[in-house]
Image: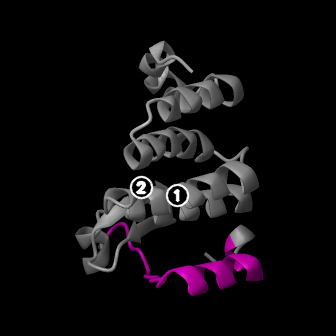
Amino acid sequence: MNTGPYSESSVADFLHGQFVPVRTECFWDNPTELMGRFDVKWTPTFLVHDATGKEHHRFVGYAPTDDLFAHLWLGKAKILYDGDRPGDAIPLFETILTRHRDAGAAPEAAFLRGVAGYKHTHDPKELRRAYEILTSKYPQSEWARRAEPYSAIPL
């Protein structure tokens, strides 16, 4: 992890400022204890855990800087969302959608932004707005297809 975006100071600063990064060597012919414990099958593997050690997000393989930041923000947002704090997760989902709108994690962020909005406000229009964003900006994504039932919600 010393090449590409992983060597950029902005990435290192973000990782060290927002997370407790753990790095370990991986040996495919003799897997380490951490590889087994966290089911690491390829590198790099990024795991986003909460303070109790529960995993909330995982992504595998090289990620360009924009995608890397989007996935890291998504992991932070999912910790809040999964912890029944949808209102606190919304600004993090929106960070992805404004700063990293072309990243691979953006469609999932748009979907979860809509669900978090609905859970926070109980307004079904939040789901419909997510559908509209997904079908206009990410029409080929699986998240647009997952949001299709929300198309029936009137705006």
- 139 above or below 23? above
Q: Are marks 2 and 1 in contact (CB under 8 Å)?
A: no
Quadrant housing residue 121: top left
Which SS class for mark 1? helix
Q: Which mark is residue 74?
A: 1
For disc 1, the neighbor class at 10 Å (few under 14, some 14 to 19, many from 20) is many
Precedes in sequence: disc 2 or disc 1: 1
The boundaries of the magenta stretch are 6-29
- 96 above or below 25? above
Which SS class for mark 2? helix
- 136 above or below 46? above
Camera sees residue 46: yes
Question: From the viewer's perspective, is 36 left or right of 128?
Answer: left
Q: Which residue is mark 2?
A: 86
Quadrant housing residue 1: bottom right
Camera sees residue 63: no
- 151 above or below 70? above
For disc 2, the neighbor class at 10 Å (few under 14, some 14 to 19, many from 20) is many
